[in-house]
Amino acid sequence: MKVLRPIIAVLLLIVVGGLLGMSHGTQMLAGVILPSIAFLVFIVGFIRKVLDWSKSPVPFKIPTTCGQAKSLDFIKADRFDCPDSKSDVIVRMFLEVFLFRSLFRNTKAEMHDGPKITYGPNLWLWLFGILFHYSFLTIVIRHMRLFTEPVLPGLGFLEYIDGFVQIGAPVLYQSDLIFLGCVTALFIRRLIAPQVKYISLGSDYFPLALIFAIGTTGMMMRHLFRVDVTAIKQLTLGIVTLDWTVPANIHPIFFIHVVLVSTLMMYFPFSKLMHMGGIFFSPTRNMTNDTRAVRHINPWNDPNIKPHSYAGYEDEFREFMVDADIPVDKPLPPKAEEPAEEAKED
Amino acid sequence: MYDKGKVLIGLAIFVIAALSIVGYNATMGDVDSFRTDGKPGPEKPVGHDKCVKETAYMQTSHMVLLNEWRDEVIREGKRELVETVGGEMVEKSLQNGCMGCHISKVKFCDRCHDYTNVKPYCWDCHLAPVEAPASKEAH
């Protein structure tokens, strides 16, 4: 059910898109108004979420340390796995954001006869993840040919590289194949790896199913139905120049594609997909491991509650401690002054 | 708000990236040229009134037809002429077929292809027709 429901949801969206795309009257709604709203929801929702995060305090210093911390001079420190300066953190974040380093460091433990345990690299998730994200990026950038006039410089080169193998006409883009292959692999991974399946929810399957449908409808438009790209560019350019038009004779598959993409944009800020912004807010990655050099102030601390040192504690409870035979650092003052002090307290 | 400066810089980058396309069209864009009728306006050939197949098919799938022709000619050696929907007999050829009627690449193929950023690699080998001197416009 956790798997089926997201798939049914995506199928419903496809039906809705198809129905709206059938008649010229509703094409405006599906092809222009919906994506415009979706884009606004995406931007505003994204900003709102980031502001929300930026208001959440980080009470403790919790970087994940995966190597030797900075210590004595002759002990080699692991700068990027246990960063102790801002610049090392920046490098660590860079490697994380652009190369998905923590997925790359994934290891798998296996039991062998003996009994013997071995640890080895397990890079499948990293491989599919990184290929997926970069082909997604390539595809998004390639789409900008539909939103700019004259077309952004550099896009021609990107298309040339992406269609380098020159298969068929119109040429097949490698990024399309890699993209669909990787979403499929990531989906199957959730079904066949028992531990992953156990923790997977509908909200894990839904984006994958949605993105798969987006990629498939996109490729179908280019290679199967052969939609009129010239007419579509009129529509898409109209959206971004606020000159809304819907040319005649656009194939309904285009509107299915757009309804799915709009759903993705609107779903984005409210879902796990926000890891796009969230990765920058991961305290386990973006904090320095310098607790022994710099005091981390918990922002939740009530400023009225002052720090209470042991000396102060002893001052407060010395009498009771002495009474209970607990050793104290500073002995009680001579007896003579006692009455005076008691009088002061009353 | 914690780390206010950094968060605001990050958000600014996000918003600028998201809206850059709108900004690009508004400033560098050639807005008016597509506002008028939106279409790139390839020049119709004179002296003919029908393409090889229906116009709607040609607009979307001419590259499929070219690919079929190429395979038939080069792989299967079928060089016989084809009949167009207008009843003319034309060579199954990019240079002698298509460009026999569409005599200008710049004013026909390129108009659409520049608009949709398509750069067919065919012209790496195939010769484009010699453009009439008057049509030496930049594209």
Image: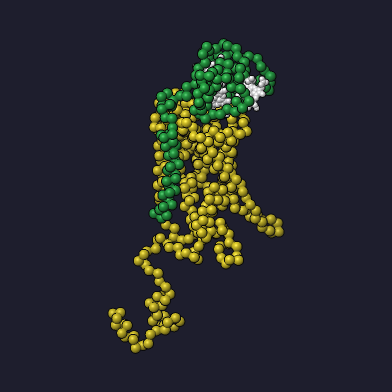
Q: At 53% across and 50% down in the image, what residue appears?
A: A94
Left-right relation of A329 to A197: left
Query: Could you tell me how many numbered marks the image carries?
Result: 0
Figure chain in yellow: A
Residue appearing at x 49%, y 32% in the figure: A151
Left or right position of B5 against A91: left
Q: How is the image coloured?
A: by chain
Q: Is A220 situated above or below B99?
A: below
The quarter of the displayed image where residue B19 is located: top left
Residue B131 at least partly seen:
yes
Q: Nearer the viewer, residue A319 or B31?
A: B31
From the rendered image, report the letter of the chain displayed in green. Answer: B
Q: Is residue B30 left or right of residue A218?
A: left
Given residues A146 and A225, the one toward you in this image is: A146
The quadrant holding residue A242 is: top left
Q: Classify residue A267 by image quadrant.
A: top left
Give residue A129's position: percent from left, percent from top: 56, 45
- Residue at left 47%, top 47%? A277
